[in-house]
Amino acid sequence: MITIIGSGRVGAAAAIIMGLMKIDTKILLIDIVKGLPQGEALDMNHMSSILGLDVEYVGSNEYRDMEGSDLVVVTAGLPRKPGMTREQLLEANAKIVAEIGREIRKYAPNSVVILTTNPLDAMTYVMWKATGFPRERVIGFSGVLDAGRLAYYAAKKLGASPASILPIVLGQHGESMFPVPSKSFLHGVPLSKLLTEEQLREVVEDTVKAGARITELRGFSSNWGPGAGLAIMAEAVKRDAKRSLIASVVLQGEYGVRDIPVEVPLILGRGGVVKILEVELTEEEKQKFMQSVEAVRKLVASIPPAYLQ
Ligand SMILES: NC(=O)c1ccc[n+]([C@@H]2O[C@H](COP(=O)([O-])OP(=O)(O)OC[C@H]3O[C@@H](n4cnc5c(N)ncnc54)[C@H](O)[C@@H]3O)[C@@H](O)[C@H]2O)c1
């Protein structure tokens, strides 16, 4: 059974796409709002019936119902409003993530946790501490989204399919995010060789600003891209696909970083992170990466200690 905690926009999108991909036969939606997960589950069950998916959705306000889940996806927390940065959500969301982490430790102690709540990397740290799980089982979602956006904007300029691009984005899911065109390839050729300096600047800027642009346009933050990315990660775990993708995980010496979660390429399977991949970077790229790591380190240092137990 997959549990999704937080039945808002991202949680619902993830539940629908996971159902369409038939990743599991049972998907549990949990939220603190009475009636919301139950209503969403009922509507999704009708979708499942119409499409013949054989996927059962269940809605609940009780954390204990997640017992037996091998995968818990956390999408609970406040989203950005127009003009806000992800970093401004830190204090409010740290409280929510710490509380949910303790419930996961109690009711799904052997699960893999995929976290979505912003500011993503700092919240991955809170979840890691609150569950007490090994770092391999606490994974922050955002890299699949950031990389997907990089592939999308580059592909538009190249007149190629985004699916033909293997994109790399490193560091923070936030203002200091580091898309790496020299290590993102279209069938063996790096984007840095295929696009002009000006085009590369635009692609990088569009990627970094994509989430804010969506929020500005429609008044609320993205959910369809995140839902798709979460489904891809859930599939890798549930089917033990050992898929390589970008996600946030606490580094323990990789890239010369310790005890800080940031986006890196990794291989994902049933038990969570199977392997972290270290991309070779130039001196200039290393500097940019470390700036991004430092931004996360600062945020982690500002988390109230009460949420790190
Ligand atoms: N990592 C990413 O790439 C990415 C992308 C988009 C959104 N996000 C983040 O995901 C989070 C959710 O975004 P959204 O658009 O779905 O927000 P939303 O407001 O639509 O949904 C959040 C839901 O969480 C629920 N909730 C709050 N506290 C809870 C608790 N303790 N237990 C259970 N449920 C609880 C709320 O009732 C609400 O239904 C935000 O923090 C947002 O910034 C991250």
Image (tube, helix red, strand yellow):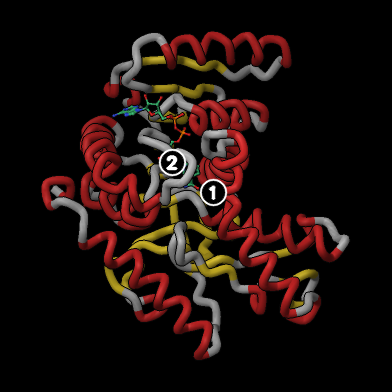
Residue 96 vs residue 238, the one in the foreground: 96
Q: Is mark 1 within 8 Å of ligand 1?
A: no
Quarter of the figure with residue 171: bottom left
Residue 47 vs residue 6, the one in the foreground: 6
Q: Amino acid at mark 1?
A: Ala
Residue 196 vs residue 216, the one in the foreground: 216
Residue 90 vs residue 226, the one in the foreground: 90
Identify the residue at horizontal 41%, vertical 63% (top origin).
262
Disc 2 crowd rating (10 Å Cα; few below 14, some 14-19, many 20+) is many
Identify the residue at horizontal 88%, vertical 61% (top origin).
159
Task: Determine whether, in the image, residue 64 is placed left or right of residue 84.
Answer: left
- Residue 309 visible in the snapshot: yes
Please state the horizontal and vertical placement of residue 307, each as a whole percent of the image: 17, 46
Please state the horizontal and vertical placement of residue 200, each as a whole percent of the image: 70, 73
In the picture of the structure, the residue carrying the numbered disc 2 is: 80
Q: Are marks 2 and 1 in contact (CB under 8 Å)?
A: yes
Quarter of the figure with residue 59: top left
Identify the residue at horizontal 64%, vertical 17% (top origin).
54
Please state the horizontal and vertical placement of residue 151, each as a whole percent of the image: 71, 59
Q: Residue furthest right?
A: 159
Q: Is mark 2 within 8 Å of ligand 1?
A: yes
Q: Amino acid at mark 2?
A: Arg
Task: Determine whether, in the image, residue 106 is placed left or right of residue 197.
Answer: left
| Residue at disc 1, secondary structure | helix
40 w.r.t. 21: above or below: above
In the picture of the structure, the residue carrying the numbered disc 1 is: 212
Identify the residue at horizontal 58%, vertical 68% (top origin).
179
Ranked by sequence position, the earlier of labels 2 and 1 is 2
Please state the horizontal and vertical placement of residue 265, each as a whole percent of the image: 53, 65
| Residue at disc 2, secondary structure | loop
